[in-house]
Amino acid sequence: MSLSPDTPLADLRSAEILESARRAFAEKGFDGASMQDIARKAGMSVGNFYRYFPSKAAIVEALIASDMEEMAQDFAAILVNADPLQALRDTIERKITEAECQGDGQIWAEITAASLRKPDIAEIAYRMETGIVAHLIGIFAHTAKVPVAEAQSRWTAHAHLLVMMVKACAMQPPENPTTADLTRLVLRNINRTLDDIATLAAAKG
Amino acid sequence: MSLSPDTPLADLRSAEILESARRAFAEKGFDGASMQDIARKAGMSVGNFYRYFPSKAAIVEALIASDMEEMAQDFAAILVNADPLQALRDTIERKITEAECQGDGQIWAEITAASLRKPDIAEIAYRMETGIVAHLIGIFAHTAKVPVAEAQSRWTAHAHLLVMMVKACAMQPPENPTTADLTRLVLRNINRTLDDIATLAAAKG
DNA sequence: TGCCAAAGAATGAACGTTCATTCATCAGTG
DNA sequence: CACTGATGAATGAACGTTCATTCTTTGGCA
């Protein structure tokens, strides 16, 4: 969660609170974490908490929205790169191998479960995934030098596959001894998928 | 959930109850579903429910354990086949494409989230996954005609990858229009992974 | 500077609800 | 009658949410 320097103070405070709420949700789940838990983690009273978010559901939605924004910024950073596909590979590798597993995988697992159950959360998650896929297809189109429409019809499923694998990796239990090997294998599969696209790019010139 | 004919009556009743509890958990999640919800789904009173399961946590554990048993039976069916690897391919394809997504993916998502949070559930899930992986490695060893120990050191990560992908597929939202394409793509990746193992088998003779 | 209201932040007890769990009670059967 | 299987009201704890109240900061005036 990066913030522009001219972010209003209240929003900055909200962002801090959201970050502590994330930890509370990671520890106890969306349903399991009580408002008291969340408020305590934020270092404030329950009553004061409601000055920042009108309800528990609002926190969850804001949390997911902030994840989406973060993701969008990651892609913005990729797109300015000279070789976007390679930048994508690097970013994915970092995402998967880095110890971001701390709370990210936890929260994603929570979102996945909740979105299969609650239509409103499903919609937010759907928008998030659609946005990511659109970014990926943009990179693919740029790499293969084909129109976006063609890239879309060709590689939408591939993009979803990438997202699925990154998510699945993040959701893996961190202390497992075989997780490292598994991560390597997944990364190979992901790179193979990207190779297919890059190969077409080379063929096209 | 198949039952041997000589299963005691009480266990049979427990199995029925477990199945209805599964539906309740799929609709509202482990934390979200109340005992009243679960009892109502089972067509009985809350009080009577406690005659079958001593606590809510016990239901969750029993549910996960029953999933594990079901999985074990699937593998038992695969192993008696003349060509276990092909039977494995068929079973995976069926698991992924079939409309089992109804509640299975939902429950798996719930288990995944819960196991990242609660150590006791994590342990059950870990045992479940370890058991499945052991079965897979057994099939690989048989196919490639190598000792189980060698198959283990070679393909443990591959086995985990298969499990991961099947689970990830099941957790995909069912109404999504691109899910069908994605499923096909995942299946191709899975078959490629199995091809690698089968190739070694052919090389070895 | 010192002082005092007005505003803003923060508190935690209280509300109504729902939760998991228990138990006194009740039909049906022998 | 006694016994078994089942009920659903009762229980106390915990939930999300509200609100009267108390601290803290601020800005104008002397």
Image (cartoon, coloured by chain):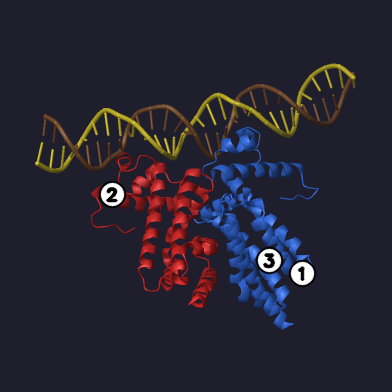
Chain colours: A blue, B red, C yellow, D brown
Circle 2: is it few (<14), some (14-19), or many (20+) Cα within 10 Å?
Answer: few
Taking the image as drawn, is residue B146 in sight? yes
* Residue that numbered label 3 is attached to: A135
Give residue B11's mark.
Answer: 2
Instruction: Quote the CA–CA distance across marks 1 and 3.
Output: 15 Å
Give residue B37's mark.
Answer: none
Q: Quadrant of the N terminus of chain B?
A: bottom left
Q: Nearer the viewer, mark 3 or mark 2?
A: 2
Q: Amino acid at mark 2?
A: Asp
Q: Residue furthest bottom?
A: A204
Mark toward the start of the polypeptide (1 vs 3)? 1
Going by the image, does B142 lie left or right of A190?
left
Element assignment for label 2 = helix
Instruction: Quote the CA–CA distance across marks 3 and 2.
Output: 52 Å
Q: Which residue is at the front of the view, B63 or C25? A: B63
Going by the image, does B49 lie left or right of A142?
left
* Residue that numbered label 1 is attached to: A83
Q: How far across and how far down the image is residue B132, in percent?
A: 45, 59
Q: Amino acid at mark 3?
A: His
Going by the image, does A114 lie left or right of A187?
left
Taking the image as drawn, is residue B158 in sight? no
Element assignment for label 3 = helix
Does C29 sit above or below residue B128?
A: above
Q: Chain of mark 1?
A: A
Q: Are marks 1 and 2 in contact (CB under 8 Å)?
A: no
